[in-house]
Image (cartoon, rainbow, N blue to C red):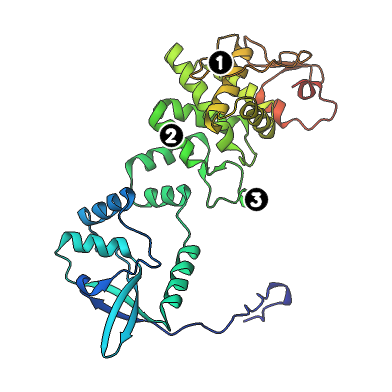
Amino acid sequence: MAKQTQATKVPKLKVNPPLGRMPVLQFLPPVELSVDPAYQRSAEGGDSQALIRRIAQHWDWDLCQPLVVARRQQGAEETFFVIDGQHRLEAAKLRGDIAQLPCNIRSYANVSAEAASFVKLNQQRKPLSKLDLFKAAIASGDKEACEIVKAMADAGLAVAPHANPTAWKPGMVSNIAGIEASWRKHGSRRTSVALRALAQAYAGQVLQLAGTIFPGIAAVSFDEHTRHKIFLHDRLEKFITMLAIRSQDDWRRDIARARVDNTGLSLTSASEHVIREAWGRASGSKPATTETVARPAPPAARPAPVSMRTGKQWCDQCDRSVDHREIAACADKFCKTKAAA
């Protein structure tokens, strides 16, 4: 076997010595476990009580991780206090039929050390993102998640493996929350068309700002299906052209400006407003809007970039009509069509 070259060697990780003592796994009855209110959060609030009842009602041993428990020695007597797992403990007590709970027993010098461990456990805990949950839903065969991922694939899109766009490939998206919201609000058919419009407008590009732009695309798709029962092919081509002749960052700036001009406007509402307004000007139709917002004046010297009949624009450089894909992909520095856009 060839020796590993210097270029491919992985630097050895420098580690600190382990802290604390190795815990002991033990099963304890819920009645023997207590919670110290000196550092533990109260479970009396409405959200905590709802969570406890939900865990109790749908108890699942596959989801019951070992509780982190501190052992306190008071003379000859041992007592046990839960550091992490209070909701599971209360849910088990509420049910009454859970005889034992798996516990990760640890010994601490004092209560202050227990509290410090409680803080560290909660600071290091990273909640699952919407992207993580969606990927898990796909793997579990969730019907809606599988339908959405199929619609994405049909449009030429794919679920991003993580939320860091610097390592994405073109066509990857992570705006799962926005796609799911459109799927439930506008329906599968309208959302599928919106996904196709996004994919075609920015084909070959990393969709870093899809989460900002997509709500507006979905809103226009909904409007067109409401008015015409379908997003007519020629109108869809014009819409894709309108999107493509402006960069993702151009749209982001307009959406950000709308939020500055209209305090309190959400990102979703601003996206819907800006792209609806732009489509209204490009198509000559009155934009449908659900919110009263100040209408920014369009640039006075900017010509209409798209033919209202064909969705194409005449290019003097090419001496022919070109569509949105050709405009967006053109790298010629003398291209007047792209400059006008």
Query: Which residue does the numbered mark 1 point to in the structure image?
Result: 235
Which residue sits at x=85%, y=26%? 334
Amino acid type of the residue tagged 3 in the rendering: Thr
Is residue 229 shown to the viewer in this render? yes
For the residues bearing labels 1 and 3, Cβ distance under 8 angstroms: no
Q: Secondary structure at mark 3?
A: helix
Judge the density around disc 3: few (<14), some (14-19), many (≥20) Cα neighbours within 10 Å.
Answer: few
Amino acid type of the residue tagged 1 in the rendering: Arg
Query: Which residue does the numbered mark 3 point to in the structure image?
Result: 166
Which residue sits at x=47%, y=83%? 20
Query: Which residue does the numbered mark 2 point to in the structure image?
Result: 181
Mark 1 vs mark 3, CA separation in Å:
33 Å
Residue 150, how many percent across, how many down?
A: 42, 39
Residue 282, how many percent across, how many down?
A: 63, 14
Residue 200, how many percent across, how many down?
A: 59, 30
Mark 2 vs mark 3, CA separation in Å:
25 Å
Q: Is residue 159 left or right of residue 336?
A: left
From the viewer's perspective, is residue 224 above or below residue 97? above
For the residues bearing labels 2 and 3, Cβ distance under 8 angstroms: no
Of tags 2 and 1, which is closer to the observer? 2
Amino acid type of the residue tagged 2 in the rendering: Ala
Is residue 63 shown to the viewer in this render? no
Mark 2 vs mark 1, CA separation in Å:
24 Å
Residue 308, how many percent across, how many down?
A: 63, 10
For marks 2 and 1, the one nearer the N-term is 2
